[in-house]
DNA sequence: AGCGATTGGTAAAAGCTTTTCTCAAGCCAC
DNA sequence: GTGGCTTGAGAAAAGCTTTTACCAATCGCT
């Protein structure tokens, strides 16, 4: 204890926190000595008193981390400056495990919880609605009167289709995932709104092989072929691009392909590298972090769903040039 | 406080912890009431006294989470039963950020720290050697006298090459990453030990396009072609498999391809799905978790490097049948 | 019936900070 | 020179739990 190196416990505390009245010279001396002996206050004791643990919990059911990791990075990025650390709890759709983790977090007096997942239209398998700590939802469905952050898939899809139009495409087909996904319906809705109903929407699964197969289907039909494919995610887009290449159709000369997600490992390795839509998950995480912090500090936050804009990532699969930044 | 519902503070504590002497009936009553009002002890207060926070920190510089996530899952899996939660701190090779996170963890009185990364032969950009809490290294280079867990890449490579031999391959080439990676040298060493020096080792980078290019190089040479490719990771293997398909070489009929890492998103989506070597990172995490816990509890642990065996994942890119389990 | 032993429970301390209250000393002004 | 301030620092309480020490009452035994 720093008090050993000079003054009383309370004087030391006041010196280090710049509170209370005391001689400037004493304050300096205490600070100096604290620095020398590497004194750091015990956050547990501090938390016990202040009712703030400077800790939050991140709950996720996204095992791959495809969505959770960027969100986590954003949260951490936003909160590290405030001295807040993050418990990461991966529950894999197991309600019992989820409850255990939530209880453990509450025991540890987290200042708040952020729930995140891999689908906008699914709840985590645990009820967080009546906790005595604030809860913020990010990229997963929230409860009534909660604060929820999610990507604006409609705007993202519009971005994609408008870009295809801008590079001169007119016959834009949409290959996407299962229709029961909310994102799928929302993206398809925006697609229809911008591109009309001239080309078909092909619903399937989120895999490369579906992208591949969908291209087969499209090219087997009689009549004019699409000159662009708006794909529901990057994996589908990659499968589609592969299928086109195998058919001798050139991307992007003959057909533009655009993806969704900007999952680097897929998008950047596709031939050619995919132009795609990034959901800005890190920014989403950042805002979720700041929001849960605000709630923890008692600042008022308007409940509701906040849609964050997506961003177009221009690579080579559509032709066209990236807008100069 | 549960005491409000019956007895004194200390009696309640003893009842709930099954310590001290007291009437069985009183104990039961306290427990029941505690259950009813949902009382849960404050872990901060408990930690203050017991010097155990039931919290550990996981430090990583692996932004993608390719390695960290399985390790994290294993740690969490092993420790959740012990009531231990995990702070995840992603430092991206930024020493200052790393130090901030380490300090924050120490302030919060973590019981231990696990350091993990993306390379066996690189240190994290922060010195953890003289902390007053135990440190365990997992999939990153540790310090003198520390406990380090890592995959046995040599054994994994042997597994791969032996499998290729078992499915009847004799001319096995090795396409891998940059020679300065320790894993690369170790895997190449095992390759040479098992397959001899008949076919070349091609060093390059960890990308699909390198796998692609390496196949071009191999097939452009005069003379007999390899009948199997042992690839340094799944991305290279995928690129190689694609290149072979484009040349009309059938996988696995003409050439077997085997990968390394078992990165599902790559291995399972390759055509055909890749047989590959799994480093069992989750198990590695589990052991690291149990070890740091043991150290935190003062149980003795032999320092040194522990190599964990890899496991062969048989899919379709080599032919052959999975050994019946 | 009386004494020691056992039983069932409470009071208190400790763990580390922060905050509020108190106190002694020094200062100024009259 | 003395009364009222200001100043600088320390004492104490609070936050929640666990543990040790303690006390009153009951029990068993002769």
Image (cartoon, coloured by chain):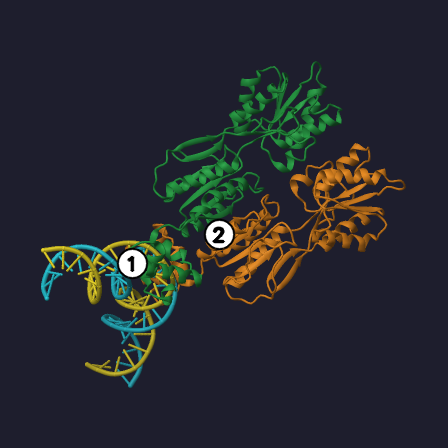
Chain colours: A orange, B green, C cyan, D yellow
Say above or below: D1 vs A101: below
Quadrant of res D27: bottom left
Mark 1–mark 2 contact, CB under 8 Å?
no
Q: Quadrant of the C terminus of chain B?
A: top right
Instruction: Give the residue number, with chain letter if any, for mark 2.
Output: A100
Q: Secondary structure at mark 1?
A: loop
Left or right of A154: which side holds A88? left
Task: Residue at 63% x, 18% y: name it.
Answer: B169
Q: Nearer the viewer, mark 1 or mark 2?
A: 1
The percent coordinates of residue A153 (x first, y second) are 70, 53
Instruction: Give the residue number, with chain letter if any, for mark 1.
Output: B22
The percent coordinates of residue A96 (x first, y second) are 52, 51
Left or right of A169: which side holds B316? left
The percent coordinates of residue A26 (x first, y second) are 32, 61
Left or right of A197: which side holds A106? left
**Within-10-Å neighbours for mark 2: few <14, some 14–19, many 20+:** some
Say above or below: A166 vs A27: above
């Amino acid at each position: 204890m720093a008090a050993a190196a000079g003054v009383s416990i309370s004087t030391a505390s006041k010196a280090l926190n710049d509170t209370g009245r005391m001689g400037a010279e004493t304050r300096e001396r205490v600070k100096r000595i604290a620095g020398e002996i590497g004194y750091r206050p015990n956050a547990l004791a501090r938390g016990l008193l202040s009712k703030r643990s400077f800790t939050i919990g991140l709950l996720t059911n996204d095992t791959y981390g495809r969505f959770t990791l960027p969100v986590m990075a954003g949260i951490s990025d936003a909160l590290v400056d405030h001295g807040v650390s993050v418990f990461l709890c991966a529950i894999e759709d197991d309600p019992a495990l989820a409850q255990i983790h939530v209880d453990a977090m509450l025991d540890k007096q987290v200042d708040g919880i952020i729930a995140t997942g891999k689908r906008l239209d699914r709840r985590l398998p645990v009820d967080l609605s009546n906790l005595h700590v604030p809860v913020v939802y990010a990229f997963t469905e929230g409860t009534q009167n909660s604060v929820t952050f999610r990507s604006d898939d409609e705007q993202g899809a519009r971005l994609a289709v408008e870009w295809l139009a801008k590079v001169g495409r007119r016959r834009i087909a949409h290959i996407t995932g299962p229709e029961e996904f909310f994102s799928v319906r929302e993206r398809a809705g925006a697609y229809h709104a911008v591109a009309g109903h001239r080309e078909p929407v092909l619903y399937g699964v989120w895999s490369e092989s579906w992208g591949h197969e969908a291209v087969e289907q499209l090219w087997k039909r009689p009549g004019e072929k699409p000159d662009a494919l708006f794909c529901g995610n990057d994996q589908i887009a990659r499968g589609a691009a592969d299928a086109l290449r195998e058919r001798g159709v050139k991307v992007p000369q003959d057909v533009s392909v655009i993806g969704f997600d900007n999952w680097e490992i897929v998008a950047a390795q596709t031939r050619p590298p995919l132009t795609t839509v990034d959901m800005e998950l890190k920014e989403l995480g950042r805002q979720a972090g700041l929001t849960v912090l605000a709630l923890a500090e008692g600042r008022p936050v308007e409940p509701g769903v906040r849609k964050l804009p997506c961003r177009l990532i221009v690579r080579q699969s559509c032709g066209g040039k990236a807008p100069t930044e």
